[in-house]
Image (spheres, rainbow, N blue to C red):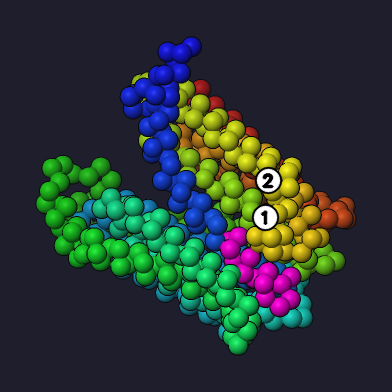
């Protein structure tokens, strides 16, 4: 038994526990830093006048904006996958600019034509001041695609040239910007409140983007020349090269469009939940309560969202012991993060975080704390989904992944709809139950899909 423990924890084997932890720890840091932004934004909004109005308005505007951004989230892996030389880099850059400007124009059309107000009013059931402020916040968010392009494109270059240590640096700068807003927001009353609410997110994004650009300029310097130098040093043809040394925009599009679909499905959860919460008697209270609770839940479980990379990096088809090692590491992570949920949900820690650090009122905090208790199972579900995802990507059987996400959305929508029809008294709690069930449905589908694929 001791020998096995040494083999999987302290041994020098490629897939030992220590090596997996060394690989995964930077990803944990990155995920925590980025996921903390939602909690800091809520903390800043809670310090504004009429916090329930602005948390609710921001949540709806942000979730709606996220749907538009889904085509841009895959820019970084596209660069890492397709940009093998200077010419390909320039083509990917041109494609990224085109798609970014397209998304920006679409958002502007929605805002200028009144479609945004109509959707917020008729689908999300916002009205009065909350509706007006949500529309104004969305107007500020029209600047978001350009900042996201700058950040993600730079990060794709970082991955390509192995400068990933720059990522947490730029993310820390982003969080520090948010903390500055939390500290000073009460003294910025001379700025229109909706503009300030939107600027909290936009300014933090642009500090991240400009820090990333500066980092690339300082380390890689001239990116096209660096690609040329990298191509000259390469001794063999890249495995992922697309039809020789040339790359057309149509080549990029064929690679990119399946990623858009997957990313789009992922962004639909929040709008679906907010739309259902908008049907309640007091939508401002319900939406803001769910936003606060889910922001904290996501922050705690965020380190697990990158676990799919561990099976890809460590599992070997000809070595069954590597699969056992990865499974044990997944179990270890699931236990650790479940324990965090238990501590926060079932002790006074959660209420302290909600009422003191985030600064929400008591009635919001009590319901949010109950939601955290229900979400205690999320770390286990998340790490198992990520494990199945990584194995499927390793085996190049990725079709079930998009279907699994579709099942997740269908289950979420049906449970929320039934809850509304049954007149569930507290839809914020009903929404977290629906979220847990949707994760379970996705995991079940992925598990049986992988078993069926492996048996054939």
Q: Which mark is residue 344?
A: 2
Q: For the point 59% across and 39% down, which residue is it? A: 337
Q: Is residue 112 magenta?
A: no
Give 41 or 304, whichever is nearer the viewer: 41
- For label 1, the SS is helix
- Image position of 15 with respect to 36: above or below: above
Q: For the point 22% across and 45% down, which residue is it? A: 238
Give 139 or 9, whichever is nearer the viewer: 9
Q: Is residue 50 magenta?
A: yes
The residue segment tinted magenta is: 38-52
**Residue 206 found in image quarter:** bottom left
Crowd class of label 2 (few under 14; some 14 to 19; many from 20; radius 10 Å) = many
Residue under pointer 1: 353
The percent coordinates of residue 179 (x first, y second) are 53, 66
Q: For the point 36% across and 67% down, which residue is it? A: 211
Q: Is residue 13 visible?
A: yes
The percent coordinates of residue 273 (x first, y second) are 70, 58
**Residue 157 found in image quarter:** bottom left
How many marks the image carries: the answer is 2
**Residue 449 found in image quarter:** top right
Q: Is residue 453 visible?
A: no
Q: Main secondary structure of the magenta part?
A: helix
């Amino acid at each position: 038994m001791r020998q096995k423990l040494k083999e999987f924890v302290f041994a020098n084997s490629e897939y030992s526990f220590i090596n997996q932890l060394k690989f995964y720890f930077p990803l944990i840091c990155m995920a925590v830093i980025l996921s903390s932004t939602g909690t800091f934004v809520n903390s800043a909004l809670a310090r504004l006048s009429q916090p329930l109005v602005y948390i609710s308005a921001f949540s709806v505007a942000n979730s709606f904006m996220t749907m538009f951004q889904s085509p841009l989230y895959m820019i970084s892996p596209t660069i890492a996958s397709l940009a093998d030389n200077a010419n390909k880099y320039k083509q990917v850059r041109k494609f990224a600019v085109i798609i970014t400007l397209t998304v920006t124009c679409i958002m502007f059309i929605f805002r200028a034509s009144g479609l945004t107000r109509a959707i917020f009013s008729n689908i999300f059931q916002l009205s009065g001041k909350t509706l007006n402020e949500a529309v104004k916040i969305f107007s500020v968010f029209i600047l978001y695609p350009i900042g996201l392009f700058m950040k993600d494109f730079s990060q794709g270059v970082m991955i390509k040239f192995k400068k990933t240590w720059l990522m947490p640096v730029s993310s820390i700068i982003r969080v520090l910007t948010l903390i500055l807003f939390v500290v000073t927001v009460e003294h910025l009353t001379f700025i229109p409140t909706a503009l300030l609410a939107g600027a909290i997110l936009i300014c933090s994004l642009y500090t991240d983007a400009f820090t990333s650009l500066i980092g690339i300029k300082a380390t890689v310097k001239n990116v096209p020349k660096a690609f040329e130098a990298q191509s000259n040093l390469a001794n063999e043809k890249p495995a992922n090269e697309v039809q020789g040394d040339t790359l057309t925009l149509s080549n990029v599009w064929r690679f990119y469009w399946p990623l858009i679909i997957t990313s789009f499905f992922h962004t639909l959860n929040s709008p679906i939940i907010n739309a259902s919460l908008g049907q309640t008697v007091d939508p401002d209270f319900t939406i803001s309560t769910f936003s606060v609770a889910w922001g904290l839940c996501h922050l705690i479980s965020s380190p697990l969202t990158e676990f799919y990379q561990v099976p890809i990096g460590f599992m070997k088809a000809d070595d069954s012991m590597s699969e056992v090692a990865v499974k044990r590491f997944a179990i270890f992570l699931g236990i650790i993060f479940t324990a965090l949920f238990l501590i926060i949900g079932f002790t006074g820690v959660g209420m302290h975080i909600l009422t003191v650090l985030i600064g929400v009122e008591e009635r919001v905090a009590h319901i949010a704390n109950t939601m955290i208790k229900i979400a205690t199972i999320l770390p286990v579900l998340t790490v198992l989904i990520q494990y199945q995802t990584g194995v499927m990507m390793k085996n190049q059987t990725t079709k079930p992944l998009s279907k699994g996400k579709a099942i997740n959305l269908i289950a979420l929508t049906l449970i929320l709809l039934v809850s509304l029809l049954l007149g569930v008294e507290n839809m914020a709690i009903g929404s977290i139950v629906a979220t847990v069930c949707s994760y379970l449905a996705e995991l079940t589908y992925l598990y049986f899909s992988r078993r069926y694929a492996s048996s054939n």
